[in-house]
Image: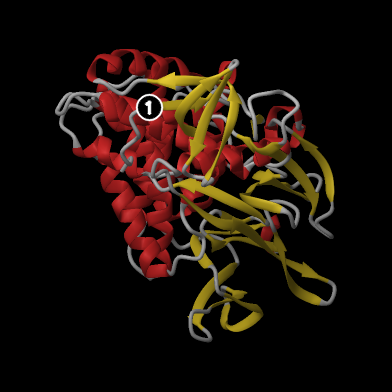
Amino acid sequence: MLPALAATLAIVALDHTPLRSAPRAQATELTTLSQGEVLEVRDERAGYLKVYSYHRERGGYVRSERVRTLGLSESDAPGLLAVLRFLRDSAGSEALGISYGAGYLKAAPGGTVTGEPLDAIGRMAERLADAASASGRQRAQAAAHLEVAGQFGIHVRSFEREGRLQYCYDGELFREVLAIPVATVEERARAVLALTRPDCVDPTLGIMLRALQDAERSVLLDSIEERSVSAMLRSRLHARRAAVWAALAYEHARRGEPAMTAAQRAIAELLAVHPQELGDEHRAEYLDAVLRVGAIRWAAVTSVAGAGPLVLTTSTGAPGETCVMLSELRRPSVALVRRCTYGIVWSASAQTVARGRAFVLAVQPLESWRELWIFRETGEGWTVDVLPPGAGDAAEGYVEFAGFAAGSSRVLIAREVREHGRFARRFEELRLEDLLPVKQASSPELLADFGRWQDVGWRRDTLSLH
C-alpha cells in the first residue's frame, strides 16, 4: 500500500512552509509546502536545508525548524511509532501522522507490524476525508492534506450527496487490519465500522449492486463479537447493524420479498443501543439509525384486516406502481378515492379514524423516507393528502399517525426528521378539516390531547418514544 521512502528524509511539520530559491529569508519563494510532505535532504546551509521534492519535481531551501528529519533504520521504528501514537488522535495533524506512519512501516522489521499502525493511519485518512467533505476553510486545508496523503497510497472516493461533494477513504488499510490475525478485536471493530458507513455508500449504485453491498456490510458487522469491545464500540456496532438491516428490509420489500425478519432484526439492534455511551462524537450515527429503522418499522408488523366501515385494497398499476383504493365495507367494489404510488404501501398501517370520516396509511417511497397518506371526507367527496416527514430540504425521516382526538377533531402525528443537518422530533395536532397544524411540541407530554387520545398501538410500537 505505502511506497518505499528514500533514505535521507525530512517531513514538513508546519503548513504554509515556503520553499525558497536560496538559503535566506529574502530569497524568492518557489512554492508553499504543506504539513506531512516528504523531502529528500541534500545539504544544510545557514539554518536552511537544501531539499528536493519528488512530488513537486522541484528543489529549494526550507528553514530547518519547519521540518523534522526522519531516520528509517530498524532502531528508529520505536520512535516513529511513538510519534504516530501521539498524532493519531490530533485533529488537524492527520497528514503529518500519515507521513510518520509510512516511515514506521518502512522502518519496522519484517513480520513485526501489528494492526495498530494500520488502524491509526486508516483513522487519520478517514478524518481527512470527512474534513474535505465539510465546508469552509477546513475543507481547503483538508484537500491539500489529502494530496499529501495520496503520495503514500491513501485514496479517496468522491460523489455528490445532498447537493455537496462527499469524500470517503477507500478503506484499503482497514481491509488489511481485517486480514491480519494479530489485529485486536477493537481494531477489527473500528475497521468494520469504517467500511460500513451509510454515508459512504455511493448513491448512484444500481438496485442489485446496492443489495449486494448491503448484504456484504451485514456479514462484516456480524463478524465482530461485540461483547469483547468497549461500551462505545458495542453501541456503535448495534446502531450500524440497525441501519444496515433497515436497508435490507427495504430492499426485500421493494422486490416483493418477505421483509419481516430483516425489519425485526433492525429494531432489535436499535433497541440494544445505549445512546449515553456514544458521546457527542458518535451520536449522529445513532440518530441516523433511528430514522432509517423508524421509516421501515411497518415491515416488522403482520398485516391484519382492520375494523371499521372503510376498507383499503391494493392493485398493480404501471410497471413498479402500486395503486390503493378506498371503499366502504358495505360497497367494496365502489371506489371512494384511488391513488397510485411507486413507493411501498404498508398495508399493516391502514386504519380507519374519525368514525369513518378519515383513513390513514403509511407509504414509503425511499429507503429512509416514509410519508403518511390521510384520506378525508370533504363536502366535495373524498380526497387524499400526503404528509411528508419534513420540508422540501429534509434529507431523511418519517411521519406517522399517533391518534385522533375525537373531542376536537384533531389528528395526532409524530415526526422524526433530519433537516439542515440536524435531527428534529416533533409531535403535532392537525385539524382534520384542513390538516393545518394547531399545536406542536418536542414531547407528547406537552400536548394534552396526546395524553388522552394517543393510539394504543402507536404507543406500543413506535420508535419515536424511545
Residue at mark 1:
8
Total marks placed = 1
Q: Locate residue 124, reporting x and y percent.
A: 46, 31
Q: Is residue 272 left or right of residue 307?
A: left
Q: Residue at x 56, y 73 (%)?
A: 329
Q: Locate residue 385, reporting x and y percent.
A: 73, 66
What is the quadrant of residue 361 in the picture? bottom right
Q: Residue at x 26, y 28 (%)?
A: 115
Q: Around disc 1, counting alpha carbons within 10 Å, would you say few (fewer than 14), some (14 to 19), or many (20 or more)?
A: few
Identify the amino acid type marked 1.
Answer: Thr
Instruction: Check the picture and name the quadrant holding the N terminus.
Output: top left
Camera-nearest residue between 140 and 218: 140
Q: Is residue 372 above or below residue 257?
A: above
Q: Is residue 340 above or below residue 423?
A: below
Q: Locate residue 216, reporting x and y percent.
A: 29, 52
Q: Residue at x 43, y 31 (%)?
A: 123
Camera-nearest residue between 426 and 219: 219
Q: Is residue 368 above or below residue 312?
A: above
What is the quadrant of residue 187 in the picture? top left
Q: Is residue 299 left or right of residue 225?
A: right
Where disc 1 sits, the SS reads loop
Q: Locate residue 9, reporting x and y percent.
A: 41, 27
State whether residue 20 appears in this view.
yes
State whether residue 252 appears in this view.
no
Q: How is the image coloured?
A: secondary structure
Camera-nearest residue between 124 and 394: 124
